[in-house]
Amino acid sequence: MGRGHYCGAQSIWVVGIDERGNLQKCWESVDKPANAFGTAHDWDPKDPFATASNLDNLTKYLNTAIPVPDDDCGECVWLPMCVGGCPNKRLFEGRHCVEFKDNPQDYVLALHARIGEKKEE
Ligand code: SF4
């Protein structure tokens, strides 16, 4: 099943707020004020771009949403499911591919083997 985006960080209206009122696009950044795109005091959701004090910290997450400007992702069979992976990791660590990226047959066989497995109670 395909999905439209990896997580809420790629939606403009999903916002994390730290204890000082800094606004973040990802919970991985709530302890990193330098990654904040604005403050709860100043940011106005009715005018989200003009009132962001660090617009790049907002738009760089939005820009990781598909279509991903990554040639490898554009040619990858997993793109409809993976959607380019975690945007926070992509921005700060580099692309994180699915573990079975280069071996889709093993993934399908493992998935097939699990069909009908009884859950332990
Ligand atoms: S597995 Fe890797 S190359 Fe493929 S869509 Fe995901 S991040 Fe992109």
Image (spheres, helix red, strand yellow):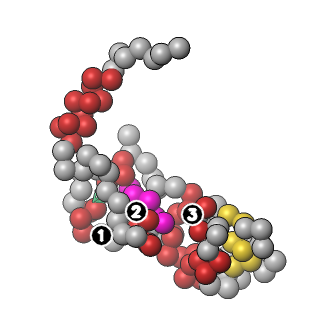
* Mark 2 neighbour class, 10 Å CA radius: few under 14, some 14 to 19, many 20 or more: some
User: Label 2 sits on what residue type?
Assistant: Ile
- Residue of label 2: 66
Q: Which mark is residue 53?
A: none
Q: Is mark 1 within 8 Å of ligand 1?
A: yes
Quarter of image, ligand 1: bottom left
Q: Nearer the viewer, residue 23 or 4?
A: 23
Q: Nearer the viewer, residue 12 or 41?
A: 41
Q: Which mark is residue 70?
A: 1
Question: Which residue is depicted at the point 24% across and 33% down?
Answer: 108
Q: CA distance from mark 1 to mark 3?
A: 23 Å
Tell me if 72 is positioned left or right of 48 in this view.
Answer: left
- Residue of label 3: 28
Residue 1 percent coordinates (x, y): 38, 40
> Mark 3 vs mark 2: which is more N-terminal?
3
Please indicate, yes or no, whether residue 46 appears anywhere in the rendered image. no
Q: CA distance from mark 1 to mark 2?
A: 10 Å
- Residue 84 counted in the magenta span: yes
Residue 18 percent coordinates (x, y): 72, 67
Please indicate, yes or no, whether residue 70 appears anywhere in the rendered image. yes
Q: Which residues are magenta?
A: 83-88
Q: Are marks 1 and 3 in contact (CB under 8 Å)?
A: no
Tell me if 106 is positioned left or right of 46 in this view.
Answer: left
Tell me if 48 is positioned left or right of 114 in this view.
Answer: right
